Amino acid sequence: MDLFTKYYSEWKGGRKTTNEFYKTIPRFYYRLPAEDEVLLQKLREESRAVFLQRKSRELLDNEELQNLWFLLDKHQTPPMIGEEAMINYENFLKVGEKSGAKCKQFFTAKVFAKLLHTDSYGRISIMQFFNYVMRKVWLHQTRIGLSLYDVAGQGYLRESDLENYILELIPTLPQLDGLEKSFYSFYVCTAVRKFFFFLDPLRTGKIKIQDILACSFLDDLLELRDEELSKESQETNWFSAPSALRVYGQYLNLDKDHNGMLSKEELSRYGTATMTNVFLDRVFQECLTYDGEMDYKTYLDFVLALENRKEPAALQYIFKLLDIENKGYLNVFSLNYFFRAIQELMKIHGQDPVSFQDVKDEIFDMVKPKDPLKISLQDLINSNQGDTVTTILIDLNGFWTYENREALVANDSENSADLDDT
């Protein structure tokens, strides 16, 4: 008890001293310069530029990376696993001592443990470690590169900032060499839209640089540096020249009166031309239009939503259109409202209409919402069936494909068997 009292008293006394120290709180908020404070704005811009240059100089350059690879190769620890060179912790630390101050951050026990997997000798792969370093350097370089376009200096990019970044990036991407300069503005708009559609769901008009780095879009964009990128990769990459030309070409084909905008009638020919009028009405009610017509930017949001229906951002876009009463959930009324249009199209095409009751029960069985009478956006996302549910409600061709899925699978199996026989 005496010892406890002694130590407790000392601790309490120490805390008093600490509290005295914190009576003087250091300044932590610095007001941003106002628009009319030109000198302060210029000073802030220059200091940020100097800071970013200093950060850039702290990164490993190509020569230093080559030197690091040479040191790692020289200190590899036998035996090799196939063609994979390995290194143990002791040699790992030796390389860290010889590689210079810039590399110090990579040669820690934490990094080694992160890359240590199942090697019975307690070693890590030299190639994996080097790739880890390269990835870190690339991330920092890219962050600095993006930060140079961050005019506000607040860690986010506005639409115009990202447009400038991508426009200046185009000449460095060999896969875009064939693009006409007159198409650049449409290409930039197409590329930027994907970032904002998925990374700015609240439509604030800005995206965090951290979010840009965390998603895979920048990797897809910079993949266009590869001069030998396969045709398949180009077709699946939203940022490739063929993909951008495809999307813009579709827009031009839909624009029958050549006024640069799409009316509801023109948009109705999108895809298989089987979307319901009820759904298209909702698109033009909820989305930004000009005198009742849709511009290219709004069209891009529409395409991104319909081509990525499994993604939460796309489901959020479509859910807003389906939620006709703006209640935050879909009930039997809203499901029936949209499915009636599917039934009408089926009659027009000479098909036997399907009972709404059956479809409604199937939808609720697929989604399994928390509330048995309401389907929320989160219910749709959690069910992993959001793409199927939305397709059933807005597109006759999509509903027909769903309704006849078993026959289509059987037909595919028969065709595969026939091909095997031949």
Image (cartoon, rainbow, N blue to C red):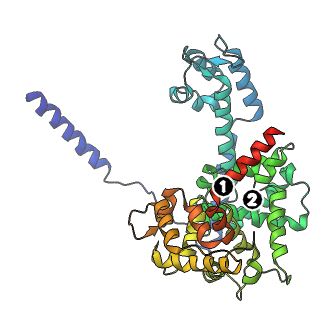
In the rendered image, residue 9, in percent from the top left (x then y), is placed at 15, 37
User: Can residue 279 be seen here?
Assistant: yes
Circles 2, 1 touching at the beta carbon (< 8 Å) = no
In the rendered image, residue 318, in percent from the top left (x then y), is placed at 59, 70
Q: In the shown orientation, is residue 333 left or right of residue 199?
A: left
For mark 2, what is the residue? 165
Q: Secondary structure at mark 2?
A: helix
Q: Viewer-proximal residue, 305 or 123?
A: 305
User: Can residue 200 be seen here?
Assistant: no
Assign the C terminus to one quadrant of the image: top right
Q: Secondary structure at mark 1?
A: helix
Residue under the image location 82 percent in, 44 percent down: 226
- Closer to the N terminus: mark 2 or mark 1? 1
**Image quadrant where residue 274 sits:** bottom right
In the rendered image, residue 53, in percent from the top left (x then y), is placed at 69, 47
Kind of residue sitting beneath label 1: Ser
Residue under the image location 64 percent in, 58 percent down: 405
